[in-house]
Amino acid sequence: MDYIQSFLNSINDYNTFGYLIALIVALAETAIGIGLLIPGSTILLFMGGMAAEGYFNLFYLIIFAIAGAVLGDNFNYFIGEKYGTKIFEKGFWFVKPAHFKKGQKFFDEHGSMSVFIGRFIPSIKEIAPLIAGTFKMKRSSFMLWNFLGAIGWGISWTLPGYFFSQSIDVAKIWLTRTGFFLAIIFVIFVIFYIIKTVAANRGESFLDLLISFLKSTRQAIVDNPNIKKYVAKHKKFFSFLKRRFDKNNFYGLPLTLLTIALIYALGMFGGIVEDVINSDSIVTADIRLENLIAVFRSATLTKFFFWITLLGKWETITIFTVSTITILWIKNKRNYITPLLLSIIGSEIFTSLGKIILHRSRPDTALYIENTFSFPSGHATIAMSFYGFLTYLLIRNFSKWKRKTNIFFSGFAIIILIGFSRLYLGVHYLSDVLGGYLSGAIWLIIAISLSEYFMSKKPEINYTKPVFKEKVITSIIVISALIGYIIIGFNYSIPLGNN
């Protein structure tokens, strides 16, 4: 062990010598014949671990490894260009003609890209540049794929050693409360992504199957003799019911579903208000959850959720709303403008009244002071009413199922993150956020209903302006809105604290 430590110390004193070793082993591993004997990849893996301990600069180590790999491949290319035909016939040292046949087959299958791919395959990485030289592959093409392959190879062998050497420190981080919280977020993200992927790839076929099943069930019920007799006795009622489920008429199925959703949202909101007023069990759960989340706070996550919560600030919403209305006006989608404003203004009035009537104080764990009352959460409300309407608007104007699914899950994620940011920053209770979601949902449903009514009465006018010009203007508006959001973030005076 003393000899090893002495060797490491000498490298630390003369680390230029260490970089030279990286270059030589990378070059030697590629060199025809020698590469079969020199474990250059293993040595680079070991040196990556040493870089984590401070013996090398990781960036310089990777640069020298890449340089050695490029030189080695060019050496083989030169050998192949000059002596490739003879070597193919007789072999060279430990490299037999069978090796060349294997390499030639690989080269035939993958073409010039084989120089890149072969770099990562043992016994091929020595042969591929030689074959490229023998076949007089264009020098510029060889250099491009050679350089890209060398970069990938150098990084793929040094970084694992570097990160593995830091694994103990990484483990310590993940054993902290913050690390545990991040692990939970990661698991939720993975589950969310899997659900989104399944819905995008299989959702449409599943929905078609479900609709087909419901139609078959409905037809079986309608054809039942006893049901026919009952319907014949109550023609007016069933005629009314049939009109309520007519999907081609706004006053049919669309209005029925929207009315049911609105009644449900109002009922849920009323239930939460009652629980808050009566200090029901939900209030106890609020306090426990808020104290639990406070334990997992860190400066990094606080900054992250600060930027998320800014998406619900009135300044950001104002910029995004003006941008959205401008784009809708340009694209002749003006039927959506009034419902959008109704959703925003109505939900804000509803929220303000709730705060004034209930006078609920903010949590004691808040990271900064808010001057308004706590219930319902204005951020959660606007997240549902504004971003929910944007999600509806985009889904309404795209035809492909996969794109609709991606839009839905993206909008859903933004809404959930804004609400959770209020919990993480400690400025709201869970019931505040749920109340805000329901408050926003009430006005979102009303806005969608108005939008669908407008669409049924006056369909959109086809837009005839140049598509390219439209895209450029839209892009400028979107980028300007995002820049405005960033400026607001850097100028907003929210103390982030150190916890």
Image (spheres, rainbow, N blue to C red):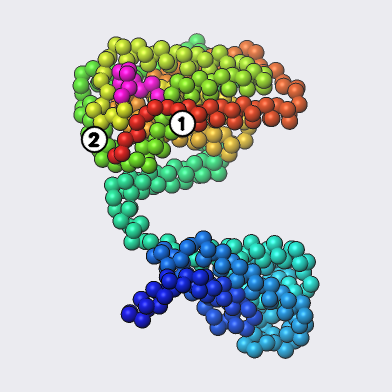
Does residue 499 appear left or right of residue 87 in this picture?
left
Q: Residues within 10 Å of mark 2 (few under 14, many from 20)?
A: some
**Residue at 74% in and 63% down:** 141
**Residue at 69% in and 87% down:** 91
Q: Is residue 56 visible?
A: yes
Residue situated in front as seen by the camera: 25 or 455:
25
User: Quarter-wise, where is residue 405 in the image?
Assistant: top right
Q: Residues within 10 Å of mark 1 (few under 14, many from 20)?
A: few
Please check the rendered image and state whether residue 375 is part of the magenta-colored stretch, yes or no.
Answer: yes
In this rendering, is residue 358 above or below 210?
A: above
**Residue 146 screen position, x and y as percent:** 67, 66
Residue type, numbered disc 2: Asn
Q: Which residues are magenta?
A: 369-379
**Residue at 35% in and 34% down:** 496
Q: State yes or no: discs 2 and 1 in contact (Cβ < 8 Å).
A: no
Does residue 495 appear left or right of residue 149 in this picture?
left
**Residue 48 screen position, x and y as percent:** 46, 67
Cα–Cα span, label 2 and label 1 = 29 Å
| Front position among marks 2 and 1 | 1
Q: Is residue 260 visible?
A: no
Does residue 139 appear left or right of residue 127 in this picture?
right
Please check the rendered image and state whether residue 45 is part of the magenta-colored stretch, yes or no.
Answer: no
Q: Which residue is mark 2?
A: 291
Mainly helix, strand or loop, the magenta region?
Answer: loop
**Residue at 25% in and 20% down:** 361
Q: Which residue is mark 1?
A: 490
**Residue 357 screen position, x and y as percent:** 29, 11
Q: Earlier in the sequence, mark 2 or mark 1?
A: 2
Residue type, numbered disc 1: Phe
**Residue 263 screen position, x and y as percent:** 40, 17
User: Quarter-wise, where is residue 441 in the image?
Assistant: top left
In this rendering, is residue 211 above or below 156?
A: above
